[in-house]
Structures are given as structure tokens and as C-alpha cells.
Amino acid sequence: MHFDNTAVCIKIVLFCLITFCNCQNLKCDGNSSDPDVRQCADLLMGQYRCDEPEIDSVTQQARGCKAKTRTVTVSCKPAPGIICYPDKSLRVVSVKPCEFDGEQIGFYQEKPCKWTNGYNFETALLLSVFLGMFGIDRFYLGYPAIGLLKFSTLGFFFLGQLIDVLLIATQTVMPSDGSDYIIDYYGAGLIKLTMNNETIIKLDDL
């Protein structure tokens, strides 16, 4: 049986071109010995812009949000004229830094997002207001023990129902699986502010 080596070689070459080619037409002829040239991921604020995550019409949150890290991957583009080393995941075949025009992806960044798992905020609040004395709100959110206790005591004689309405309305009580509520993207979602390494403190305000 005749084996066509030419066809195999063509397929290998095409695979290599598709896998390792510089598909963004980057100009990668910068000075690699320049100490000021850094990785694109290490650029300072103002030297790049990151795309906004795609919003899922069902969950009203970022599509592809990871449950464990509560982050979503977005592409970031260095500003025009910036010279840096692109991310290795872009498979740019060059040992020299590249110059960007503002429309080419230089690296990827993780942005915080809200992971949802089917629990609607409006549904939970309405259940708490109208059926909270029977514990239906707690059953819905995944707390069957508390729901059964509320059902047996008519919402702790309606006092527990009132407390749960306030807790759900202020988003203090969340679904039992740790997910966030499904709320309109620009709706009444609460964000807890905490300090981290990226927090900027103005000395004039102290």
C-alpha cells in the first residue's frame, strides 16, 4: 500500500503554522536588552485596557465565571506605542518585545465576578414576604432544617419571618451553596468592599 508522505508533511506544516503563527500581525523587533521593557502583564494602570466580560442574558452576570475563584478571564490590550513581551499563551514566535497599536491582545487578566447557580433574588424575597411563615424561602435557598422549623412554628410566630425578610432583602442570607443571587446586572446587587494590595489610599483623606 502506497503511503503518501507529501500529504502528511503538508498537514504537519499547516498545523505548525496555525498553532504557532503570530495571528495578530504584531511587530516584534524591539530592543530585548532594554531594561525598561517588561512583560505586558506587568504594565502599569493606564498603559493598557481590558475588555469587559460578556454578560449572560440568563444569569445577568459574566459568562464563564469560575465557581472556585469567582473570577472570569478577559483579554487586555496595551496602549498604542507600548512595547512589551506578550503573554506566552498567545504563542507569539519571537524572543524580542512587540509593539502594540491598541487593538492587539497582549495578555489575559482575571476579573472578579459573581457566580450564580439558579437562585433568583426576587423569587427568594417574594417567597419570604408571602410564604416565609411556612419556611418556603429557606427551603428555596437550600436550608431545609430551618425551613422545617419555621413551618412548625409559623415562622417563629412571624418574628422569624420578619427577620428573614430583612436578611434576604439586605442579601445577608445567601443560597446555601455559596452562590450569588441572580439579579439584573445594574440591579440592586450589593458589593462588599474590602482592602487588598490593589486598594489605593489617598493620604489627603487621612
Image (cartoon, rainbow, N blue to C red):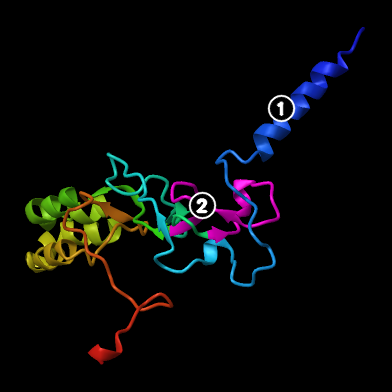
Cα separation between marks 2 and 1:
26 Å
Please give left or right for residue 8 compared with residue 28 in the image.
right
Task: Look at the image and tell me whether residue 70 can be seen.
Answer: no
In the image, which disc is placed on residue 100?
2
Q: Which amino acid, mark 2?
A: Phe
**In this rendering, would 141 be left or right of 42?**
left
Which type of secondary structure does the marked residue at label 2 adopt? loop
Q: Secondary structure at mark 1?
A: helix
Q: Quadrant of residue 192?
A: bottom left
Q: Is residue 69 above or below residue 4?
A: below
Query: Mark 1 = which residue?
Result: 14
Q: Nearer the viewer, residue 121 or 83?
A: 83
Q: Is residue 126 above or below residue 24?
A: below
Q: Main secondary structure of the magenta part?
A: loop
Q: Residue furthest top?
A: 1
Instruction: Please state the horizontal and vertical placement of residue 92, each as a whole percent of the image.
Output: 64, 47
- Residue 47: percent from left, percent from top: 44, 63
Q: Residues within 10 Å of mark 1 (few under 14, many from 20)?
A: few
- Residue type of the residue flagged with mark 1: Leu
Q: How far from the left and from the top, in percent, is residue 103?
A: 44, 46
Extent of the magenta region:
83-110
Q: Residue placed at 17% from the left, 53% from the top?
A: 187
For the C terminus, the image quarter is bottom left
